[in-house]
Amino acid sequence: MAKLPPPVARLRAAVRDGLADLPRGSLVLVACSGGPDSLALADTAAFCAPRLGLRAGLVSVDHGLQEGSAERAAGVAAWAREIGLDPAEAVTVVVGAAGGPEGAAREARYAALDAAAERHRAAAVLLGHTRDDQAETVLLALVRGAGPRGVAGMRAVRGRYRRPLLGVARTDTHGACAERGLAPWADPHNEDPRYLRSALRPALDSLVAVLGEDLVANLARTAALVGEDTDYLDGLALAALEECRDGGPAAARQRPGTGEAAAGRDPGRGPGDVRDGAPRNGRLDAKRLAALPGPVRTRALRAWLLESGVNGAELNHRHLAAVDALVAAWKGQGPAFMPGGIEVRRADGRLAAVVAPGAAGASHA
Ligand SMILES: Nc1ncnc2c1ncn2[C@@H]1O[C@H](COP(=O)(O)OP(=O)(O)OP(=O)(O)O)[C@@H](O)[C@H]1O
């Protein structure tokens, strides 16, 4: 038997590893743009899935933002059907305006992928991110001064999403496309220096030239190591958060506050109307919080803020520092202001997250 070309062999090994734990008979959907990474992934999944007792399908999302995008998505789906992927769908989405064009396209894409996964009862959706994408993510996190959560980069498994190629070099996905006679689409965005990630690629190449070939793999390894530590600390923080809830660990999570709570007499525990000034998610005991180690405390506070309806994408280190100061540097200061018109106040030794009276655009999650 002819020896398998090394890039193809490496992709197949990675996909086998990444899917081995899925129950036999389940469906995996490849999210495929038509670019080299996800095209190689789809081709590999078509080969590996039946050998693992799985079914494989494909979804290609047309964002409707570039000329020919609908034809491209339809072409990818038609190719997928030819190689036996089933279902194989092209889905057109309407991209909104919020969060910038890239953010809005991402949001619409993930909504479409989630809907497809629900529709077909897929056990997993596979994304084509590679080790090089991970290295870029780590560098971008360092550039913006992110904490460990950012440096941990993308996760191999997050909910229904899996990235089986996260340990595979981009040269291998491109090599596999060439070996298998696939004709990937070249996304012009990847060459457009107005996108930070695209601008970073040549810079990363220059770093590799100076620091050596291992740089990309080492950055990706850093992400994996930091990710393990972050997950561990997040676990500690969630347990600590329960201990710090007003009323003790047995206190049920409450979202949002009740009318009584709005009057400031009682934190309130049952579901009720969200109204201005009502605590969003119960209160926290500031003394118990203050006794926690800093990294656990700030993680617990972050988790509580997200529960309280603060948008995680908008929550930055300054917001967190302001809330933390209410606990660890308490001098009777006023509220800490969070995105979405939510305020965190300290009164009677307890923290409450409330919708600022009259706040416009406060999200009532
Ligand atoms: N239009 C799309 N339809 C379906 N999946 C997509 C689409 N765009 C991106 N994806 C998924 O998200 C992954 C990352 O996309 P992104 O555009 O950031 O990366 P990329 O490195 O250019 O990947 P690719 O070579 O697959 O286009 C893709 O590999 C693919 O799995």
Image: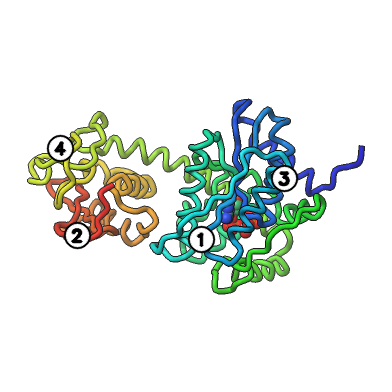
Q: Is residue 142 above or below residue 299?
A: below
Q: Are marks 2 and 1 in contact (CB under 8 Å)?
A: no
Using the image, tell me which numbered label, if any, was put on residue 43: 3
Q: In terms of image quarters, where does ligand 1 lie?
A: bottom right
The residue closer to the viewer here, 74 or 258, is: 74
For the point 53% across and 35% down, the residue is 120
Helix, strand or loop under label 3: helix
In the figure, is residue 343 to the left or right of 65? Answer: left
Name which of mark 3 and mark 4 comes first in the sequence. 3
Viewer-nearest of discs 2 and 4: 2
Viewer-nearest of discs 2 and 3: 3
Q: Is residue 192 above or below residue 77?
A: below
Viewer-nearest of discs 2 and 1: 2
| Real-space Cα separation, disc 2 to disc 4, in angstroms | 22 Å
Using the image, tell me which numbered label, if any, was put on residue 359: 2
Using the image, tell me which numbered label, if any, was put on residue 268: 4
Q: Amino acid at mark 2?
A: Ala
Kindly tell me whether residue 300 is visible in this rendering: yes
Mark 1 nearby-residue class (10 Å; few <14, some 14–19, many ≥20)? some
Helix, strand or loop under label 4: loop
Name which of mark 4 and mark 1 comes first in the sequence. 1
